[in-house]
Amino acid sequence: MLQRIVQVFFVLVGGILGIFFMPALMRLLNMQDIPFLNTPYTLAILGAIIFYLATFWLVEGVVNWIKRLEESLVKAPVTDVLFGSLGLVFGLIIAFLLVNVIPFKDVPYQAIGMIIQIFLAILLGYLGFQVGFKKKDELVNLFSITNRISKKKGSNDEESEHEEKKLKILDTSVIIDGRIADICQTGFLEGTIVIPQFVLEELQHIADSSDVLKRNRGRRGLDILNRIQKELAINVEIYEGDFEDIQEVDSKLVKLAKLTQGVVVTNDFNLNKVCELQKVAVLNINDLANAVKPVVLPGEEMKVQVIKDGKEHNQGVAYLDDGTMIVVESGRDYIGKHIDVLVTSVLQTSAGRMIFAKPKLLEKAL
């Protein structure tokens, strides 16, 4: 079907060009005296026949080019296509205005004026598309700023509700972690959950890995997504777009969050820092976990089991039930034993929490 459409287009173009340019070709070939060749209908038919014959060599390349263009448009994010199209329309409008303002009809040869008009339309249309495509982020930010200003004129309740219902964009690590499903179930996470298609592809790639551990992690992530989508009363959307010019999934997440003014939900410490540097809102569930952990203060006593050696000399390592690591000074001699320790300091970051302690027996000896 597409091939037939291209052929019809070539025939129409050939007929139009035949009317305008065939007389000059006839004069060049000294055939202008033949009566039946000088009528517009004959010229149009000759031009259409010539271009129709050309389609046997050109139509396949044109059809393949159109199909590649179609695939790239389908894969491109909606915002890229939308702003690129708006820029194209704006460029064509400017070209139309210029054509009507500049007297191209006064050009010595009418064909030259027509070529200039076509060139202006193509050039300004292309420039408009490129400006709209490459400046889409700034345009999105401009529209979002305007939207915020208009909302400020409304009630504060509506604005706060809008802020609470920002899109929550999940990354791969937080899906595999699994705690996000429990957080959604408790109702602490409001708004729409967005799962990008490129995150799903990464999860599927992990689930198909030859490594058993990776494969189990990937399948666990897919099970968590099924649970969130089917069992929990929360709105879940799949973002179908992709960013072909960006390779890293984390960078794509940051770009998507910027475009949608959404919030990245993660437990990846490095992604957390990248979002903060690029002024992107981020929710780190490790921060939430740390916030709800029981507070441990220096000087408190606790009973722990020393599991293994620490990194430093003569250190031992123990763990709380929630996985918090306790570094016990001079605890190497107590590996495998339950001992009472005194907390000396607590280090709490987005990567987790560490507790430093020393044996109570050592404190008494001192």
Image (cartoon, rainbow, N blue to C red):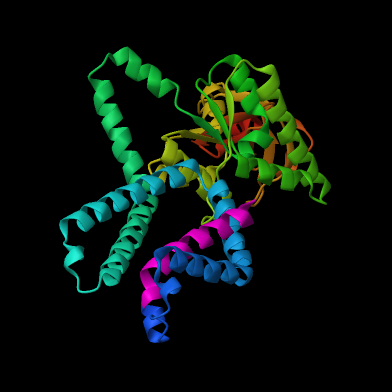
> On the picture, is 340 further left or further right than 194?
right
User: Image check: 212 left or right of 166?
Assistant: right
The boundaries of the magenta stretch are 1-23
* Up-down relation of residue 67 to residue 255 (above or below): below
Q: Quadrant of residue 269?
A: top right
Q: Does residue 12 show up magenta in the picture?
A: yes
Query: Is 162 located above or below residue 201 in the figure?
Result: above
- Measured along the vertical axis of the image, is residue 33 above or below residue 116? below
- Is any part of residue 191 visible from this angle? yes
Looking at the picture, how far across and down is residue 30, in whole percent? 40, 86
Residue at 51%, 65% (x, y): give it.
48
Quarter holding residue 54: bottom right
Image point (51%, 49%), residue name = 251
In the picture, which quadrant includes the C terminus? Answer: top right
Would residue 355 appear left or right of 31 to someone viewing this image?
A: right
Question: Is 25 left or right of 97, judged from the image as shown?
Answer: right
Whole-percent x, y for residue 243 in the image:
52, 50
Residue 3: x %, y % from top left: 63, 57
| Residue positioned 45% across, 47% down in the render | 80
Residue 53 within the segment the image draws in magenta: no
Q: Nearer the viewer, residue 45 or 98?
A: 45
Could you tell me if residue 344 is visible in this image?
Answer: no
Q: Residue at x 37, y 83 (%)?
A: 27
**Magenta stretch prevailing secondary structure:** helix
Relative depth, front residue between 78 and 353 = 78
Q: Position of residue 140 (x, y in %)?
A: 35, 40
Question: Looking at the image, which is closer to me, 288 or 215?
Answer: 215
User: How many dots with numbers?
Assistant: 0
